[in-house]
Image (spheres, grey):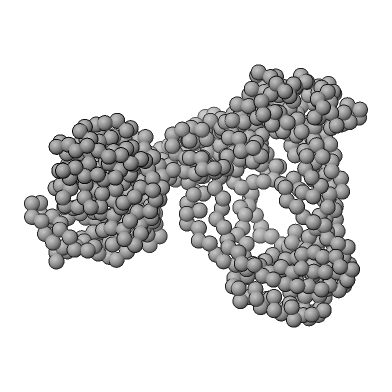
């Protein structure tokens, strides 16, 4: 779908970032400082915007020279200021779902169901399927009785009663007609809620909405923030060191900037060294009192102790130490972060104003985003793992199989959403939009026509995760022996059959006498052999749905024209029967960039869209290639000696040799007689 596909693509892109991530070690140095009256505080070593050192030797050198500095430790510069934090905007559905997921781990669908129940059954919340975070001027007259109603509830009386006594004048952060569409933000109704009639989850969502609503009419929270540069080392000419927020930043090319990976210094700057200390203390609670945020924490829960009084030129005593750390991959999406990415068409945006500007360019609507996520889960394109959403191999294969990348582009779908919104406002025309769509479809069809046919997993399948090929050719994971032909979710034994089933060998291969590949949910996962070498039920084994069926008919029905070439029999070698789209951690020996994945008839490079045409056919020289042979071919350039059948009916000893220059029709594995 137009929304499902780019949403899945964002999850796949993040998963690929994580899989391809290579951690880098770095070291940081911190100093613990003490004033003459015994007050202590901590600060981090910093050179401009950089805090990371590439080697332990560099960090050790910093520590050594700063310890040797002795009394040459002074407060070089200080800054004190007051920082105000405005109340967060009222909830729309997406922000409510994101907050509930972060705080209580509710799924987006669960939050929608609860909010809908509070609206329809309990009638204590307004319409929840809204994308607005503001009220209209018509709502202003309804506020005083609403405050009075909330003041009658003991849990909220301390915060609602002052608003009854001194009615506030709503700011434009609360009331703005220009930012309200069909429905205003989610707020409580004037009906007094009987909290005892709500279940625990309903009470949680109601509490979130009430506190967000009341907090919107409270003043900003105010913080006293103090920063200090500490100089350690020999005196230098007076240099004004900028604060981090004063440092020049790269010019933006338009749109929100993606976060930059911090630099890791490869060489040590000359002394003196400088340490940056920060402290913060809340002076006015404001809306945070309503939200239940403590005085020693910010809105995101982080705590920053206040610094002691410091003056420029003040002498300090210091001790220093370094810490080893590693860079970390980007986190997997939770439902909260995925909803935010859908709202901004994949852009990383935390600022509420920028997010509002991108609202028309999002994927789906607040009312449909939860169902999109649930549909991807139901169709096994993604799975929930603890609090994260992870694409399955089938979901990854789907995105990688798309011959036109823009089909999965969040930005393209976002731009369509924006144009549809412009049409609704009379700022664009339907005819122009449909003309552009027609041209895009024509270009897309032409691109698909000339693209190689993509390989897709069997319908209804859930292929395994990326496999790890060990030293002995064994496949990592729970499945057991290498080359297991069925890739089953659970083990089960099978009765023998004279009609031919899943073939068995010492590698646990899954080729039948007809050379058919199997995709079962149960039978044959242990590669159990019968007296005739088969491992199938009397009906030929389990099919893609776990239904018993003939292996021949099942294979042709489930994957027409995608069955690998037949072998002369299971006796010639164990088959690597792996679902289409399965990724293996073997690097393509041709381009040396992509990984190998299973296609319909062979192993190919995942970078086929970029032009890599490397392929090793499942059947080469009359034999189905085993997992250890595939590993040997890719890593060693040749297999061990074995019996092949380059000419039908004439078995011959030899080995397969890797030939990356061979044209794709013949494949990169060439038979070489011994």
Query: Residue 406 location in percent, x, y?
Result: 46, 43
Establish if 557 lies above or below 391: above
Q: Residue at x 84, y 28 (%)?
A: 157
Q: Residue at x 10, y 56 (%)?
A: 651
Residue 639 visible in the current orientation: yes
Nearest the viewer among 96 and 347 is: 96
Residue 419 visible in the current orientation: no
Query: Residue 424 location in percent, x, y?
Result: 61, 28
Residue 430 is left or right of residue 463, and the answer is right
Q: Residue at x 65, y 73 (%)?
A: 59
Residue farthest to the left, as pictured: 649
Q: Residue at x 77, y 55 (%)?
A: 304
**Location of residue 334 by image quarter:** top right
**Location of residue 240 by image quarter:** bottom right
Nearest the viewer among 530 and 171 is: 530
Residue 413 is left or right of residue 169, and the answer is left
Query: Residue 347 location in percent, x, y?
Result: 59, 46
């Amino acid at each position: 779908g137009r929304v499902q596909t780019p949403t899945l693509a964002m999850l796949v892109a993040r998963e690929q970032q994580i899989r391809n991530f290579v951690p880098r070690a770095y070291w940081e140095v911190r100093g613990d400082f003490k004033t003459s009256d015994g007050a202590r505080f901590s600060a981090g070593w910093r050179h401009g915007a950089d805090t990371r050192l590439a080697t332990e030797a560099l960090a050790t050198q910093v520590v050594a020279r700063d310890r040797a500095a002795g009394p040459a430790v002074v407060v070089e510069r200080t800054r004190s200021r007051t920082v105000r934090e405005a109340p967060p905007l009222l909830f729309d559905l997406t922000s409510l779902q994101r907050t509930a997921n972060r705080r209580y781990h509710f799924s987006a669908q669960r939050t929608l169901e609860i909010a809908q129940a509070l609206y329809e059954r309990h009638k204590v919340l307004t319409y929840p399927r809204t994308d607005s975070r503001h009220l209209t001027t018509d709502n202003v007259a309804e506020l005083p009785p609403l405050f009075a109603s909330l003041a009658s509830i003991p849990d909220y009386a301390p915060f609602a009663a002052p608003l009854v006594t001194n009615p506030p004048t709503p700011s434009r952060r609360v009331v703005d007609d220009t930012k309200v569409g069909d429905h205003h933000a989610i707020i409580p109704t004037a009906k007094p809620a009987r909290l005892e009639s709500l279940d625990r989850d309903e009470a949680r969502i109601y509490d979130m909405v009430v506190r967000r609503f009341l907090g919107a009419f409270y003043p900003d929270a105010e913080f006293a923030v103090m920063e200090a540069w500490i100089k350690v080392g020999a005196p230098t000419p007076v240099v004004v060191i900028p604060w981090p927020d004063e440092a020049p930043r790269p010019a933006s090319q338009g749109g929100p900037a993606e976060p930059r990976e911090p630099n890791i210094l490869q060489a040590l700057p000359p002394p003196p060294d400088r340490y940056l200390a920060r402290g913060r203390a809340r002076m006015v609670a404001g809306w945070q009192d309503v939200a239940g945020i403590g005085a020693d924490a910010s809105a995101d829960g982080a705590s920053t102790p206040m610094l002691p009084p410091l003056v420029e030129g003040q002498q300090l005593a210091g001790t220093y130490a370094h810490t080893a750390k590693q860079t970390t991959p980007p986190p997997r999406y939770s439902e909260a972060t995925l909803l935010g990415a859908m709202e901004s068409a994949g852009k990383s945006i935390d600022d509420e104003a920028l997010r509002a500007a991108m609202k028309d360019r999002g994927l789906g609507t607040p009312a449909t985003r939860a169902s999109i996520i649930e549909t991807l889960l139901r169709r096994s394109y993604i799975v929930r793992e603890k609090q994260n959403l992870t694409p399955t191999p089938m979901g990854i294969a789907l995105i990688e199989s798309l011959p036109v990348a823009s089909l999965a582009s969040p930005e393209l779908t976002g731009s369509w959403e924006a144009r549809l919104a412009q049409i609704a406002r009379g700022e664009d025309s339907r005819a122009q939009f449909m003309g552009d769509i027609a041209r895009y479809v024509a270009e897309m069809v032409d691109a698909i026509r000339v693209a190689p046919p993509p390989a897709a997993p069997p319908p209804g399948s859930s292929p395994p995760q990326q496999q790890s090929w060990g030293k002995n050719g064994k496949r990592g994971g729970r499945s057991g022996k290498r080359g297991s032909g069925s890739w089953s979710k659970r083990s089960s034994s099978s009765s023998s059959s004279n009609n031919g089933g899943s073939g068995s060998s010492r590698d646990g291969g899954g080729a039948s006498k007809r050379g058919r590949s199997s995709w079962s949910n149960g039978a044959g996962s242990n590669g159990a052999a019968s007296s005739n070498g088969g491992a199938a039920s009397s009906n030929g084994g389990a099919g893609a749905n776990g239904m018993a069926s003939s292996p021949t008919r099942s294979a042709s029905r489930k994957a027409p024209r995608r069955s690998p070439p037949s072998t002369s029999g299971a006796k010639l070698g164990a088959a690597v029967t792996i679902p289409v789209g399965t990724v293996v951690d073997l690097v393509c020996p041709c381009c040396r960039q992509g990984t190998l994945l299973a296609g319909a008839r062979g192993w190919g490079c995942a970078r086929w869209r970029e032009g890599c045409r490397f392929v090793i056919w499942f059947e080469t020289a009359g034999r189905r290639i085993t997992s250890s042979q595939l590993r040997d071919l890719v890593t060693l350039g040749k297999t061990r000696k074995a019996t092949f059948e380059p000419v039908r009916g004439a078995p011959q000893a030899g080995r397969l040799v890797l030939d990356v220059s061979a044209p794709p029709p013949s494949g990169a594995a060439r038979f070489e007689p011994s």
